[in-house]
Image (cartoon, rainbow, N blue to C red):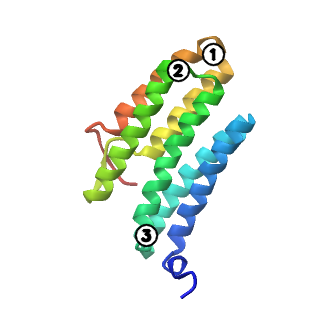
Amino acid sequence: MLFNQLRTLRLPDTLTLLGLLCVSFSVYFSFKGLLILAYFLILTQFLLDYFDGKLARAIGGGALGLYLDSFTDFMAVASSVVFGWFLGIDGIAMLIAGFLNLGAASIRLAYFTAYKQKGFTGIPTVLAASVVSTIALLGYLFAQEYLNWFVIFYFISAIAMVSDLRLRKI
């Protein structure tokens, strides 16, 4: 059968793939210096992630949906790190914080995929990516001279993703 893999996708999976497209374009637009557009694409993925989860719980997701969602969530964190670099948060501290964010997101998503939960353990990756991107953008817009200090929020983001904090799904 031609395109058999695509036939397994359901509507929630399509929203997830749109979210993946958003964060992929966010990286591209960060490289191009279109930082506001890159930021809004990260936020758009946040909204798509929320709605694909709601829809998947309501009508059921495809067999691949859980894995697609985890991959897209990981890419949201990666795009937020790239976004921070292009805002001007750089240096060895940001390199370490970026690595820690990617590692924390990987661990958190693997844990979430392996162990079914009623709520969230740790801050959801997409929420962490959206919040840290928002804080970084505010630093870029309003506190440019202190921007490199905003790397602290990337460290906090990594810690929050793997913390024992419990949140319920909404």
- Residue at 40% x, 73% y is 63
Asked if residue 18 shows in the view, the reply is: yes
- Residue at 49% x, 26% y is 95
Q: Residues within 10 Å of mark 3 (few under 14, many from 20)?
A: few
Where, by quadrant of the figure, is residue 34 drawn?
A: top right
Task: Looking at this view, name the residue that lies furthest to the bottom.
Answer: 1
On residue 52, which mark appears? none
Please name the residue that numbered disc 3 is placed on.
Answer: 64
Dot placed on the residue nearer the N-terminal end, 3 or 2: 3
Which amino acid type corresponds to the residue marked 2 in the rendered image? Phe
Please name the residue that numbered disc 2 is placed on.
Answer: 150
Q: Real-space Cα distance between discs 3 and 1?
A: 43 Å
Whole-percent x, y for residue 26 in the image: 65, 45
**SS at badge 3:** loop
Dot placed on the residue nearer the N-terminal end, 2 or 1: 1
Q: Residues within 10 Å of mark 1 (few under 14, many from 20)?
A: some
Q: Residues within 10 Å of mark 2 (few under 14, many from 20)?
A: many
Asked if residue 40 shows in the view, the reply is: no
Dot placed on the residue nearer the N-terminal end, 3 or 1: 3
Which amino acid type corresponds to the residue marked 3 in the rendered image? Leu
- Residue 69 left/right relative to 135: left
